[in-house]
Structure formats: C-alpha cells, structure tokens
C-alpha cells in the first residue's frame, strides 16, 4: 500500500500554479496574534472554473521538538461562481503560537491532486 505522503507534489510557487503560498512574518512574539494567509496563483494564476479548481487548503503547524503537527485552519472552496464570477482560493486566519516551528500548507486541485509547501517561523 502506498503512503499518502508519496502523493504530495511540491515546487516553487513562483513557477508552479498549484503550490500554496504561505504569507506569514518570519518572526513573531510568543502568544501575540498575527495573520496567516494562504493563497494560490500569486505569480501564475490558477484556473478557477467548474472543470478545474482548488477545492481546499489545510494548514498545520509542527512545533520544534513536537511529535505531531497541530491543525491551524481548513479553508473549503465549495462555491465556484457562475458565468465570469468566481471565488479566488485565498484563506486568512489570525493565529498565535508559543514556540518556533514549521507551517505546512496543503492544497487540493480537482485535476492535479495534492500540493504542499512549508515555511519556518521563529517565535521569540
């Protein structure tokens, strides 16, 4: 049986339209709120139609020294619009952390599958 981890694709979001882009500060203060934004198509637009769309994002945090990641947010894009009106896949959440670690963002394209990206964050 193949592990689900083998199904994740990755790349540079500047050259691959399916890779989620993580917008966070490089450093934050412990316990202070900050915005976490995840988007697709910042450099190369992703189609968003009834036939080809980003269905969801999942965002996890793996604290340094922690055994398991912690779920921070899930963004579902079930409404895809009508005619020329479409929802852009962008998720925004306000979070706070108590220690440094890695943010993991996963996106799912209905045609091209699972994509991931990571970004380290320092908590002071």
Image (cartoon, rainbow, N blue to C red):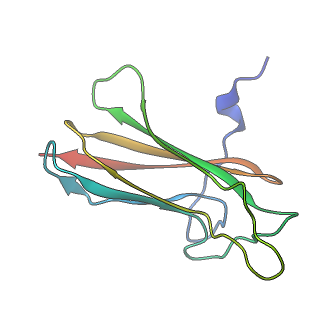
User: Is 97 on the left-hand or right-hand side of 79?
Assistant: left
User: Is 99 on the left-hand or right-hand side of 43?
Assistant: left
- Residue at (16%, 49%) from the top-left corner? 32
User: Is 116 on the left-hand or right-hand side of 65?
Assistant: right
Where residue 52 appears, as percent x and y from the top left, is: 82, 63
Q: Which of 119 and 93 is in front in this view?
A: 93
Figure check: 41 above or below 107: below
Q: Which residue lies furthest to the bottom in this view?
A: 84
Where residue 40 appears, as percent x and y from the top left, is: 59, 65
Figure check: 50 above or below 109: below
User: Is 101 on the left-hand or right-hand side of 84?
Assistant: left
- Residue at (16%, 42%) from the top-left corner? 31
Where residue 89 appears, as percent x and y from the top left, is: 61, 64
- Residue at (72%, 54%) from the top-left corner? 78
Q: How many labels were placed on the picture?
A: 0
- Residue at (66%, 41%) from the top-left corner? 8
Q: Nearer the viewer, residue 54 or 77?
A: 77
Q: Nearer the viewer, residue 17 or 31?
A: 31
Figure check: 48 above or below 91: below
Q: Residue furthest right?
A: 51
Res 85 → quadrant = bottom right
- Give the position of the C terminus as an image quadrant: top left
Where residue 24 appears, as percent x and y from the top left, is: 33, 59
Q: Nearer the viewer, residue 16 or 114?
A: 114
- Give the position of the N terminus as an image quadrant: top right
Res 109 → quadrant = bottom right
Figure check: 84 above or below 63: below
């Amino acid at each position: 049986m193949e592990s689900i981890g083998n199904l994740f694709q990755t790349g540079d979001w500047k050259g691959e339209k399916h890779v989620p882009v993580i917008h966070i500060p490089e450093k934050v203060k412990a316990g202070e709120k900050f915005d976490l934004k995840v988007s697709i198509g910042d450099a190369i637009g992703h189609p968003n139609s009834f036939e080809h769309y980003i269905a969801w994002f999942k965002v996890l945090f793996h604290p340094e020294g922690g055994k398991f990641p912690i779920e921070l947010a899930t963004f579902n894009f079930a409404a895809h619009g009508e005619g020329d009106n479409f929802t852009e896949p962008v998720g925004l959440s306000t979070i706070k952390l108590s220690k440094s670690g890695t943010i993991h963002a996963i996106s799912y394209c209905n045609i091209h599958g699972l994509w991931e990206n990571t970004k380290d964050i320092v908590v002071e």
